[in-house]
Image: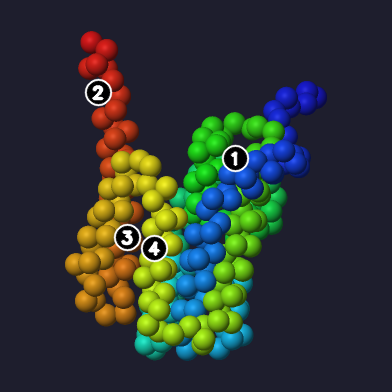
Amino acid sequence: MQMSDAPDVTTHDPAAWRDGVKTGIPTLFGIGAWGLVVGVAMIKSGLTLPQALGMTLIVFAGSAQLASLPLIAAGAPIWVIFATGLVVNLRFVIFSALLAPHFGMLPWYQRLHLGFVSGDISIALFLQRYPDPAPAPGKLSYLKGLLYPNWASWQVGSIAGIFLGNAVPAEWGLGFAGTLAIICVMVPMVVSRPALCGVLVAGAVSVLAAGLPYKLGLLAAVLVGMVTAMTVEELGDKFAPATGKEERQ
């Protein structure tokens, strides 16, 4: 029986780990600031200290947390809260599909662990470094070098916000600071036409549907934005070969 010549992506590579950490360092301040804002928001929305700590450690999804907090405070139906969190986090289904060709050989519990600590910007940085799913030495170490500091930065910021929440005056306007932090994290990810179209359409829909009850405008914005991005990408793939053929003629 012949042994496979494919490189082992699971063997720990200290150099790749350090490279991943170095690549992700510029994003950590924005992640920590975003976590700080969410931590303060959890306390300001009425969650107890154990509830807020449990939410940040178990949920670990800033956008979903921020979207669900007003619903929790308003006493919205539980299905609306869960549906909001689910729709906001649907992007991770796309991330999973993108990472599956790279790490599909790992045991399910390792993939589950990596999925739990994954963050938007970390996945984007990994895919920029490794767009080809072909096995390559150090892949897993590089990904972990991105994910773990990102997770730690979020938790440090969020837990600090939880303990400082009651001491932060409302007039400081941390909600706006949170928006800036999210923008700083999001902008580097809008590197393609489908992503840009999806963001613009989602923004427009969120403004137009802002008056819907239970923040359902957010759900509509996320769904329409995702459909727009996928449609633009599909149309681009459909017409790209025809365009290339015309250029060659």
CB-based contact (under 8 Å), mark 4 and mark 1? no
Mark-to-mark CA distance, 1 and 3 = 27 Å
CB-based contact (under 8 Å), mark 1 and mark 3? no
The relative height of residue 62 versus residue 2 in the rendered view (above or below) is: below
Q: What residue does disc 2 label? A: 243
List x then y, in percent, for residue 158. 56, 72
Mark-to-mark CA distance, 2 and 1 = 31 Å
Is 58 displayed left or right of 196 in the figure?
right
Residue 234 shows up from this direction: yes
Q: Amino acid at mark 3?
A: Leu
Q: What residue does disc 3 label? A: 223
The label shown at residue 24 is none
The kind of secondary structure element at disc 4 is: helix
Residue furthest left as drawn:
208
Is 235 displayed left or right of 14 in the figure?
left
Mark-to-mark CA distance, 4 and 1 = 32 Å
Is 176 displayed left or right of 59 in the figure?
left
Q: Amino acid at mark 4?
A: Leu
Q: Amino acid at mark 2?
A: Thr
Mark with earlier residue (4, 1) = 1
Mark with earlier residue (3, 4) = 4
The label shown at residue 180 is 4
Which class describes the residues within 10 Å of circle 2: few (<14), some (14-19), or many (20+)?
few
Mark with earlier residue (2, 1) = 1
Mark with earlier residue (3, 2) = 3
Q: Amino acid at mark 1?
A: His
Mark-to-mark CA distance, 3 and 4 = 23 Å
Q: What residue does disc 1 label? A: 102
Mark-to-mark CA distance, 3 and 2 = 30 Å
Residue pictured at 40% horizontal, 79% vertical: 172
